[in-house]
Image (cartoon, coloured by chain):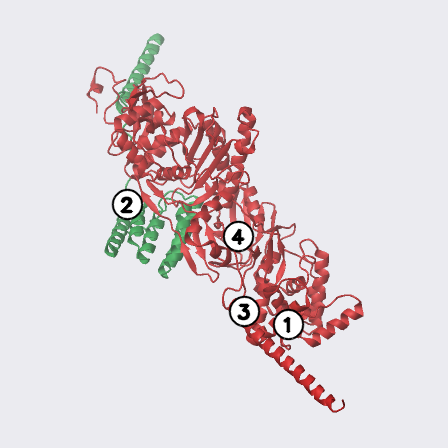
């Protein structure tokens, strides 16, 4: 037995050695496998970062009018916080005694960089009097307010982060994180047995878990590669991953990945990850601009972000911050004075900037365009910055005007109410810049949560009388605004059947001036004109304005009895507002990748469709339509600036339209039922008041300037009754009128000319 | 005597009235067509010395002033050869003031720099529409047009 014993021991030892060796080889192989996995993850995209969609920038300048309510809402959405004292930190604002003091935030986005500064905006009622930069006392001609984040393209993970380089991170922040989370980070190889023992002793002494033993590398391994469950095998893997990571990467790289990865709290349904996003979320600052106390607060959050969040638990946040500061002092990172000063600073945070899908119909329209450019996974993972043309103030005004307008209609006309929400009266609004084609606002329906169908970009509706300006345009080579048209009943054979157009209301004159026929939307005179010009020519003129729907040369075409997409109708009207050129409707402007490289740029693109002089002539007649014609109620509704527009009502009152514009902004409003039920309301009754409410709200977009009279236009004084050159003292009602230079009345009034003397000679 | 005097005075007054009436009728005869009709877009005489004729005579609205500032900024971008930034600024400039002829002129320059004659030509036409008819501008527009044609 005794002789066997050493042999047995030797065998056992050999077996043990063999198993240890085997385990060692297995561990090494496993670590190799892990190193491949880690390298694979780190060499490719480390994080799936959703692309962010932004509105357009807002320009402020002295003399500009401002809708204070809309502008302050915008600032609130941008995360500016109202304070009662003069703003001291970035992201604060105060409105006192007609002065808006605004401490602009830092803007660090691909394609857009600005360091925040304090600015003073003096207001006089609704007008900006002066803008001044407070640090330099320099007056500003133009101030840019940063774009708002409108939407995030999320993939499976609803995380938001903005990446920072370790070189951007202030020393205080690194020290704060090390002091509170892993003060031996630069000494240990990924795991820290000394730290673990120290944590164990601390916890034993206190009788509770006060200190974790995990190093930063282990925390990173846990977050990046492992699931949250607590098992022994998971802990082993965590240690192995940490060791492998340390073998593969230097400390600086690991710290950079850690700071970009770590969870910092919740912004609604979206998690805030990484120090870059956290700095913006909590302090509206770029990471470089964080102060010592802010660094300590953020470092303190890592342990339990939702427990220590300064937004809802300021006291807990403060005590945690102070604990971090004390730890920094103990480690020698800060001195006594720095500690004292930082501790005395109260907790101050930026307001929470809104996320979520805003302007949802616009976003759908935009997403459709983006889908043609990038696959979904690229949009949800590549962290693009997508800049759009949306003006959030105009969008808000359009949403309010439509919602209030439809409610008002239902209240005044209870027969329009429907019990089912999806059957309710609907509407749509689009606002464009008539020259650049920028879509400033889009409301495709009454309630996106009920119906996502975009009535501006997808609906095909009859335009009714809103098509008439294009019909009249086709006649301007031969006729002029003073030409007389027939208002007599007419019967036209269409495909073997009789068609008898009728006026909306009786007009007893047999002849009517072209300008009045358009302003009062007279059907008989319009059909007379279209038949005279030729239906083929009318159809060609309409087609030239970029409608994608078929335009057939039927007589009813002149009354808008065909289908159009509202967006295309709005764009076509830009041709009148924009001196004969139609713009490509722009919603997407630029796409940048994370590094700030421009991937896409969309530019203002124009297409000439008619001459500036003809376009102006239509505009001048549509100005008349809103002062004397079917749009005359606009002045009662507060529209006192130069504007041109046209109402539209279709057969059986199925659609009500108003399209109107100034030199700088064009808006189209449509109201109707999705199932084509009659409303018994005209465009002037249903759509025009919504347009008026919208335009009255977007003061910052309206200059009040007159439409410019282009070359090739002359004025003549004409007799309103004959449409010919007025004779002084004989013609009872005269008017000064614009004409094309090459097509103006040449004959004096034959209706009121005396039958003797030199007047008979004419001119 | 007194009666005679009164009669003479009345006659004199009547004569004066007739004379005045005649003068009025003579200066504005009834039945004439109104002659004051003028083209509201008169051609400005050529003035070589006008420093910056881009946006002309009348007092400028705040939007126009801001638009000119942006145009100046864009010009600096163009001078530095940065057509992209110039285009973005000019698009804002013409959005604030859609009749800013110089804005369109510089947009055409930016597109020449980007070697896109199609777009450059569109903005050259717009510049022609909105810039004053001064010889200095017309020459510049024509010169620009020729440079665009050479690009094609």
| Image marks 1 and 3: residues in contact by CB distance under 8 Å | no
Identify the hue of chain B.
Answer: green
Q: Which residue is mark 1?
A: A239
Name the image quarter holding residue A741: top left
Q: Which residue is mark 2?
A: B133
Q: CA distance from mark 1 to mark 3?
A: 15 Å
Q: CA distance from mark 3 to mark 4?
A: 29 Å
Q: Which residue is mark 3?
A: A37
Res A565 seen here: yes
- Outermost residue on the bottom side: it is A3
Residue B118 image offset from top left, x and y in percent: 29, 51
Element at badge 1?
helix
Q: Are marks 3 and 4 on the same chain?
A: yes
Q: Give the chain coloured red.
A: A
Residue A647 image offset from top left, x and y in percent: 42, 29
Q: Which residue is mark 4?
A: A152
Depicted A396 relative to depicted B12: above or below: below
């Amino acid at each position: 037995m005794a002789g066997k014993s050493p042999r047995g021991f030797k065998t056992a030892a050999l077996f043990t050695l063999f198993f240890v060796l085997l385990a060692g080889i297995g561990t090494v192989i496993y670590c190799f496998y892990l190193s491949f996995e880690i390298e694979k993850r780190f060499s490719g995209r480390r994080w799936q970062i959703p692309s962010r969609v932004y509105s357009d920038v807002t320009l402020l300048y002295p003399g500009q009018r401002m809708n204070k309510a809309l502008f302050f809402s915008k600032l609130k959405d941008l995360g500016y916080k109202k304070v009662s004292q003069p703003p001291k930190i970035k992201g604060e604002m105060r409105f006192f005694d007609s002065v808006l003091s605004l401490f602009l935030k830092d803007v660090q986005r691909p394609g857009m960089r600005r360091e925040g500064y304090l600015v003073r905006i003096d207001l006089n009622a609704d007008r900006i009097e002066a803008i001044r930069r407070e640090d330099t006392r320099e007056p500003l001609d133009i101030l840019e307010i940063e774009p708002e984040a409108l939407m995030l393209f999320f993939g499976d993970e609803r995380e938001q982060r903005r990446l920072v380089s370790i070189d951007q991170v202030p020393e205080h922040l690194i020290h704060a994180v090390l002091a509170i989370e892993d003060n031996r980070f630069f000494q240990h190889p990924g795991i820290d047995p000394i730290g673990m023992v120290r944590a164990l002793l601390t916890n034993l002494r206190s009788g509770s878990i006060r200190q974790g033993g995990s190093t930063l590398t282990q925390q990173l391994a846990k977050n990046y590669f492992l699931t949250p469950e607590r098992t022994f095998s998971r802990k082993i893997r965590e240690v192995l991953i940490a060791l492998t990571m340390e073998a593969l990467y230097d400390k600086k790289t690991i710290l950079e990945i850690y700071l970009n990865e770590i969870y910092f709290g919740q912004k609604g349904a979206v998690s805030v990850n990484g120090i870059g996003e956290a700095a913006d979320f909590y302090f509206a600052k770029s990471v470089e601009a964080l102060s010592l106390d802010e660094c300590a607060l953020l470092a303190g959050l890592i342990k339990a972000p939702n427990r220590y969040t300064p937004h809802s638990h300021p006291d807990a946040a403060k005590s945690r911050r102070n604990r971090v500061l004390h730890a920094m002092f103990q480690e020698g990172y800060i001195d006594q004075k720095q500690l004292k000063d930082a501790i005395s600073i109260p907790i101050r945070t930026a307001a929470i900037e809104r996320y979520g899908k805003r302007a949802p119909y616009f976003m759908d329209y935009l997403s459709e365009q983006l889908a043609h450019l990038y696959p979904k996974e690229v949009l949800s993972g590549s962290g693009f910055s997508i800049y759009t043309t949306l003006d959030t103030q105009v969008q808000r005004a359009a949403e309010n005007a439509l919602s209030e307008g439809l409610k008002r209609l239902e209240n005044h006309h209870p027969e329009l109410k429907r019990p089912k929400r999806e059957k309710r009266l609907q509407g749509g609004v689009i606002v464009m810049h008539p020259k650049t084609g920028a879509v400033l606002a889009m409301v495709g329906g009454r309630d996106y949560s009920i119906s996502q169908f975009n009535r501006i970009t997808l609906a095909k509706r009859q335009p009714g009388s809103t098509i008439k300006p294009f019909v009249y345009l086709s006649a301007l080579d031969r006729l002029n605004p003073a030409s007389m048209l027939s208002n007599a009943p007419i019967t036209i054979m269409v495909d073997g059947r009789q068609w008898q157009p009728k006026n909306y209301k009786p007009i007893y004159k047999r002849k009517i001036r072209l300008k009045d026929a358009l302003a009062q939307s007279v059907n008989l005179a319009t059909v007379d004109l279209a038949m005279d010009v030729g239906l083929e020519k009318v159809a060609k003129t309409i087609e030239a304005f970029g409608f994608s729907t078929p335009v057939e040369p039927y007589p009813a075409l002149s009354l808008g009895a065909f289908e159009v997409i509202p967006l295309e109708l709005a764009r076509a009207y830009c041709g009148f507002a924009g001196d004969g050129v139609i713009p490509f409707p722009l919603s997407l402007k630029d796409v940048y990748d994370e590094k700030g490289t421009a991937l896409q740029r969309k530019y203002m693109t124009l297409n000439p469709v008619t001459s500036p002089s003809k376009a102006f002539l239509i505009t001048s007649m549509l100005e008349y339509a809103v002062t004397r014609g079917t749009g005359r109620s606009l002045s009662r509704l507060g529209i006192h600036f130069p504007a041109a527009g046209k109402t539209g009502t279709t057969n059986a009152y199925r659609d009500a339209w108003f399209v109107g514009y100034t030199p700088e902004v064009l808006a189209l409003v449509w109201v109707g039922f999705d199932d084509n039920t009659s409303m018994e309301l005209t465009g002037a009754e249903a759509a025009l008041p919504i347009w008026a409410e919208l335009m009255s709200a977007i003061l910052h977009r309206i200059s009040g300037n007159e439409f410019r009279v282009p070359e090739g236009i002359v004025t003549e004084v004409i007799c309103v009754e004959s449409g010919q050159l007025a004779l002084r003292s004989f013609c009872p009602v005269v008017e000064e009128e614009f004409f094309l230079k090459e097509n103006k009345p040449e004959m004096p009034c034959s209706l009121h000319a005396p039958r003797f003397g030199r007047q008979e000679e004419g001119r | 005597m007194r009666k005679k005097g009164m009669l003479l005075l009345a006659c004199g007054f009547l004569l004066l009235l007739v004379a005045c009436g005649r003068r009025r009728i003579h200066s504005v005869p009834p039945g004439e067509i109104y002659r004051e009709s003028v083209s509201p877009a008169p051609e400005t005489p050529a003035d070589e010395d006008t420093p910056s004729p881009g946006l002309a005579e009348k007092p400028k609205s705040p939007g126009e002033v801001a638009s000119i500032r942006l145009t100046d900024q864009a010009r600096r971008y163009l001078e530095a050869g940065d057509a992209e930034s110039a285009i973005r600024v000019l698009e804002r400039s013409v959005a604030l003031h859609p009749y800013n002829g110089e804005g369109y002129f510089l947009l055409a320059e930016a597109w020449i720099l980007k070697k896109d004659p199609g777009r450059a030509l569109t903005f050259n036409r717009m510049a022609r529409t909105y810039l004053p008819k001064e010889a200095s501008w017309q020459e510049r527009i024509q010169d620009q047009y020729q440079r665009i044609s050479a690009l094609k």
